[in-house]
Image: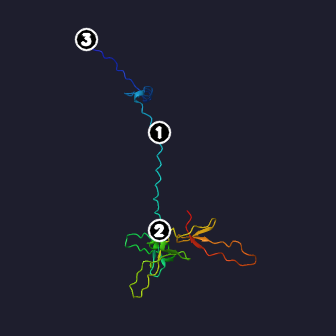
Amino acid sequence: MRRRTFAASVVVTLSLADLACDGASNPPRTANPPGPETQTPEPEPKSKPTPPEPESKPTPPEPAEPLVALQPDGTCQEFPKVDCPEDPNISCNPPAPREVPCPDSVYPEAMNTQKVVLRGDGSCWEDQGGDFECPKGAMCNPPPPKRVQCPASVLPDPAPKAKVDTRPDGTCWEMGSVGACPEGARCNPPPPRRVKCPT
């Protein structure tokens, strides 16, 4: 009878230190190593933010010209123009009117400039009685002269090198000069006279 023989078992013992060294010597491989075509592109430099344009400020409205009105007593009142809000809950009290010299613009234009007379105070008056007819046997008073705007044909030109002042009502006045005054005497200059405004 044939006898069977068994080989001796071999046991291999590995320490944890050997496994650790073996893992460090063989790092794991990546499936797809990054190549030149797979490199992450560099971020573009950020552009500086554009500063906002300064807001244009609204242009304030030009102040309105005050209204000058002729009163029944012959004086003139200036009424300031004030833009009051439309909101009825907001109160708006414009300034009170004030008396000002009457400009020519408040008077009517002359119907016939040949009948206009310039007075010493600078006012112009048109004669209304030239064409007046009174019925025979009646007592009639011709209409009084009417104040009108001074036409340019009535105003004299200022003297050469004369001082001309413009008054608040827009009229121009030539200031008289004393000229040669005798020694020891008191001389008064002539009163100013209304003239055409220099251009």
Relative to 24, residue 92 above or below: below
Q: Decide: few, some or many residues near mark 3? Use Cα within 10 Å; few <14, some 14-19, many ≥20.
A: few
Residue labelled with disc 2:
65
- The answer to whether 65 appears left or right of 136 in the picture is right
Which badge, 1 or 3, is on the more N-terminal residue?
3
Which badge, 3 or 2, is on the more N-terminal residue?
3
Quadrant into which the C terminus falls: bottom right
Label 1: state its secondary structure. Answer: loop
How far separated are the C-alphas under marks 3 and 2?
143 Å
Q: x, y (%) of residue 92? A: 43, 74
In-front residue for pair 27/59: 59
Residue labelled with disc 1:
45
Q: x, y (%) of residue 73? A: 46, 82
**Residue 116 visible in this rendered orientation of the protein:** yes
Q: Decide: few, some or many residues near mark 2? Use Cα within 10 Å; few <14, some 14-19, many ≥20.
A: few
In-front residue for pair 30/36: 36
Q: x, y (%) of residue 120? A: 56, 77
Relative to 36, residue 188 above or below: below
Q: Quadrant of residue 82?
A: bottom left
Quadrant into which the N terminus falls: top left
The label nearer to you, 3 versus 2, is 2
Q: x, y (%) of residue 91? A: 41, 74
In-front residue for pair 72/41: 72
Q: Decide: few, some or many residues near mark 1? Use Cα within 10 Å; few <14, some 14-19, many ≥20.
A: few
**Residue 28 visible in this rendered orientation of the protein:** no
Residue type at mark 2 is: Glu
Residue labelled with disc 3:
2
